[in-house]
Image (cartoon, grey):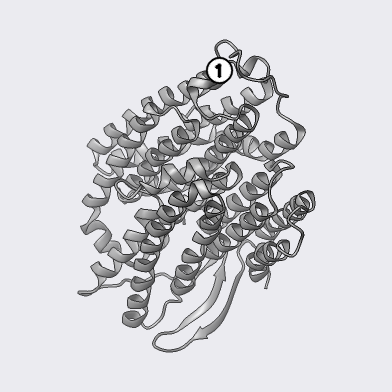
Amino acid sequence: MMLLALVLVPLIVGTLLFALPAAAQTLSRVIGVVASLATVVLVLAARGDDWSVRWLSRPFTAAFHLGLSGLSFWLALLLTVVTLSAIVACNASARRDLIAQLLFLEGTMLGLFLARDLLLFALFWDAMLLPVFFTLLARASHVTTAWRYFLYNFAGGLALLLATAAFGVLFGSTDVIGQAGVHVIGAWAPWILGGFALAFLVKTPVFPLHTWMPLTYADTPPAMVAVVSAVQSKAGLYGFIVIGLAFFPDYMKAYAGIFLVLGAISLIYGALAALAQSDTKRIVAYSSLSHLGLILIAIFSFNTIALQGAGLYLIAHGIFSAALFLVLGFVEEREETRSLTHLGGLGALNPRLAGALCIAALAALGLPGLAGFAGELLIITGIFQSGLLWAALLALIPIVLAAAYMLRLFQGVMNGPQRSDLPIRADLSWREGIALAPLVLALLALGTIPGALLQTVIK
């Protein structure tokens, strides 16, 4: 029952927040922090648990089946920690609705990562679109972004739902995630895999299905985009690992060339696009396209070392992308701009803010000793061992470009002369520091002792 409570707590508390007056912003934040802290505790306490209730017997069997182990545990822990940091980071003017939607997003994504039934997985997949969609829709200037986000991801979700139904009819059950020896074969198998793959590629996202992502990341409030970038973008790659590799290994290998090419294009295109941006949030958005393209290549290299690196890098990317978006959100709150052409020299008067951005940026460019390095090293080593020499060499190019665009981001915001038209604001506050502390500590811990995670992230 603890697993069920883990999913229901943020959903129920998020619903109850709407019973508060819209002006009760401080109370909403306090309740949100308590609820998100409770989910962190529940994740740690429920590790290894399994809970199931059958709820469908025809035309195939399905169950409300939840489990928490391996990669799902680490992604759930990442989600709860990032959500806690995001809610703490919300300032006094944060709307009650934003806190509620953050909790809804947390609850639906926890359901996704805990789901051990494909149908339950598909239902949570669609449900997790709604908090982001309604948050964007609340502002008239972001309506186009909201609908672009929804239509792209709903189309992927529909393909996922149809593939799940076909899987259930052919196999007789959808209660299969985490089971060994379930291999789908036959004339319909490539089509079912195609439905899953479309949803996973859109969600990651991968070029050319990525066009919803830059706008969404730029227009979504920093607290929510931190969660979306850190965790929601991992849902597709998680699906390839726990569904694609588990149930369609032969077909994954047969069509691997397509996914390797898509990953390679995303890898290079994302890095070049990040280098060309002047909007700070778009720099991080396109860098994510590049980083996640590398993970896609690792998955389709079918190498154990690369796959372990992919699992480690999934978590590392989630931590440093969340930290980057939160810090850049603090900068935007102070200076009311995200443009590098209108920023500069903030580090001299904001040393703590500059330090936080520096650590997150260095982790993103793969500095040894921080979280991103070990995952990248394992991925490139594994890709090379698998015989994909071209992909291993290609992966080195974005690593160099990452240093260029991350240093450009830091330089443009924190270094140089203080712009005379920018107001002088206070440095990183205690609230902001507390929000960033677990993320910065995780970057350091995962960079120095990655083996603690590697032993359990991919089994």
Please give left or right for residue 177 compared with residue 16 in the image: left
Check disc 1 and give the amino acid type.
Gly
At which x and y percent is residue 332? 59, 31
At which x and y percent is residue 176? 43, 73
At which x and y percent is residue 89? 68, 41
Q: Residues within 10 Å of mark 1 (few under 14, many from 20)?
A: many
In the image as oriented, which residue stretches furthest toward the front?
A: 140
Residue at screen point 69% across, 67% down: 12
Q: Quadrant of the N terminus?
A: bottom right
The answer to whether 12 is drawn above or below residue 424 in the figure is below
Res 297 seen here = yes
At which x and y percent is residue 367? 49, 27
In the image as oriented, which residue stretches furthest toward the bottom?
A: 58
The answer to whether 314 is drawn above or below residue 70 in the figure is above
Q: Can you identify the residue that label 1 sits on?
A: 344
Res 237 seen here = no
Which sits in the foreground, 5 or 414? 414
Please give left or right for residue 203 compared with residue 113 in the image: left
Quadrant for residue 331, please give it.
top right
Please give left or right for residue 256 compared with residue 425 in the image: left
